[in-house]
Amino acid sequence: MSNASCCGCNLKQACLIVGVLLAMLLGGLLMRRLVDQQPARSPRAARAEERAKNRHDYVEALKKETSGVAVLNAAEGIYRIPVEQAMEITVREWRNPEAARKQLNARVEKAFAAPPAAPAPPSKFE
């Protein structure tokens, strides 16, 4: 009788092990399928792509502005030059600090000159 109970235990253990392995295999397959599925595109993803495109366009425009030469206002002598060239000019001008300071002050006075006074209103007696 001890042999019969021993065989019964082995069969139960084998069935339990096979059941657990089968459950693990099915669970793994289900997880794999869920992970592989492409999630639905959310509105946030579309907005993120739009923001990325806008940022890329902005950076390209900024590079173009900072690296190119352009006339902004020829009458007032305002031009756009590359940053590297502007730094070289600044270094060259400031080798003589007194002359550079005078030139800088003249530019500031020209840029921030007070507007002309408004004409006096006509007198009611005229």
Image (cartoon, rainbow, N blue to C red):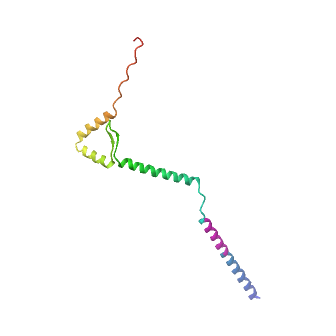
Report the label total.
0
Observer-nearest of 109 and 6? 109
15 magenta-colored = no
- Taking 2 as reference, is 58 above or below it? above
- Considering only vertical position in the picture, is 21 above or below 80? below
Q: What stretch is highlighted in magenta?
A: 22-34
**Quarter of the rendering occupied by the N terminus:** bottom right
Q: Position of residue 89 (x, y in %)?
A: 27, 45
Name the residue: 68% across, 78% down. Answer: 18
* Residue 73 percent location from the top left of the image: 35, 38
Q: In the displayed structure, does residue 7 sit left or right of residue 87?
A: right
Quarter of the view holding residue 96: top left
Q: Is residue 110 above or below residue 82?
A: above
User: Which residue: 64% across, 68% down?
Assistant: 30
Measuring 59% from the left and 55% from the top, which residue is drawn there? Answer: 42
Q: Which residue is drawn at 52% across and 54% down?
A: 49
Helix, strand or loop: magenta stretch:
helix
Q: Which residue lies furthest to the right in this view?
A: 1
Q: Which sits in the foreground, 94 or 38?
A: 38
State the quadrant of the C terminus: top left
89 on left or right of 2: left
Q: Which of 7 and 107 is in front in this view?
A: 107
Q: What is the x, y in percent for residue 87? A: 30, 47
Viewer-nearest residue: 15 or 36: 36
Establish if 27 lies above or below 9: above
Q: Quadrant of residue 80?
A: top left
Q: Residue 72: x percent and y percent?
A: 36, 40
Queried whether the magenta region covers residue 24, the answer comes back as: yes
